């Protein structure tokens, strides 16, 4: 599965905003030896949100640490040509924000569900868990 930016942050910071269903899905996946991913665009998005004081600096520090040494078992997926092509399958009319489209396209490309509470992404037709 792929975690959207907020789901990854909430998971790593142990915040209650992550739904019980999403948390159990993450734990089940990791216990089963399967990977959990987040898009490299989440690092960019988190930098932006920290700069705007919408997330604590600790969020970016945790994300950066997870890239170098995965403590939580989450692996970064680069934004490459395959993900860029998959973005075209995420309707801009439904999911207007490019970071959200890239994250959704990452899940689509990997053929795994996306953990997100974003209603627009949930309405886009890709598999989601919340």
Image (cartoon, rainbow, N blue to C red):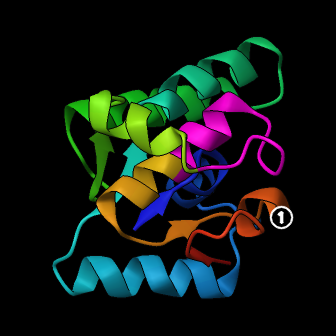
Quadrant containing the C terminus in the rendered view: bottom right
Q: Is residue 105 left or right of residue 109?
A: right
Seen as rendered, the residue at the extreme top is: 51
Residue displayed at 43% across by 76% down: 26
In the picture, residue 59 is in which quadrant?
A: top right
x and y percent of residue 9 in the render? 58, 47
Quick check: 3 above or below 80? below
Q: Is residue 37 left or right of residue 24?
A: left
x and y percent of residue 47 in the render? 61, 18
Q: Is residue 91 magenta?
A: yes
How many marks on residues?
A: 1
For disc 1, the neighbor class at 10 Å (few under 14, some 14 to 19, many from 20) is few
x and y percent of residue 111 in the render? 35, 67
In the picture, residue 44 is in which quadrant?
A: top right
Residue displayed at 38% across by 70% down: 112
Quadrant containing the N terminus in the rendered view: bottom left
For disc 1, the marked residue is 119
Quick check: 78 above or below 118? above
Residue displayed at 75% across by 33% down: 97
x and y percent of residue 33 in the render? 16, 79
Q: Is residue 28 left or right of residue 95?
A: left
Residue toward you, 73 or 56: 73
Q: Which residues are magenta?
A: 90-104
Residue toward you, 109 or 89: 89
Quick check: 126 above or below 8? below
Residue displayed at 70% across by 78% down: 19
């Amino acid at each position: 599965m792929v975690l959207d930016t907020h789901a990854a942050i909430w998971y790593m910071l142990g915040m209650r905003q992550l739904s019980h269903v999403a948390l159990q899905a993450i734990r089940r996946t990791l216990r089963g030896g399967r990977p959990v991913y987040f898009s490299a665009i989440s690092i960019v998005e988190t930098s932006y949100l920290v700069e705007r004081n919408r997330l604590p600096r600790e969020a970016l520090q945790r994300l950066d640490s997870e890239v170098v040494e995965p403590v939580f078992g989450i692996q970064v997926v680069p934004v490459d040509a395959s993900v860029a092509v998959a973005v075209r399958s995420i309707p801009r009319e439904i999911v207007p924000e490019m970071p959200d489209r890239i994250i959704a396209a990452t899940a689509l490309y990997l053929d795994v569900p996306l953990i997100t509470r974003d209603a627009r992404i949930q309405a886009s037709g890709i598999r989601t868990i919340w």
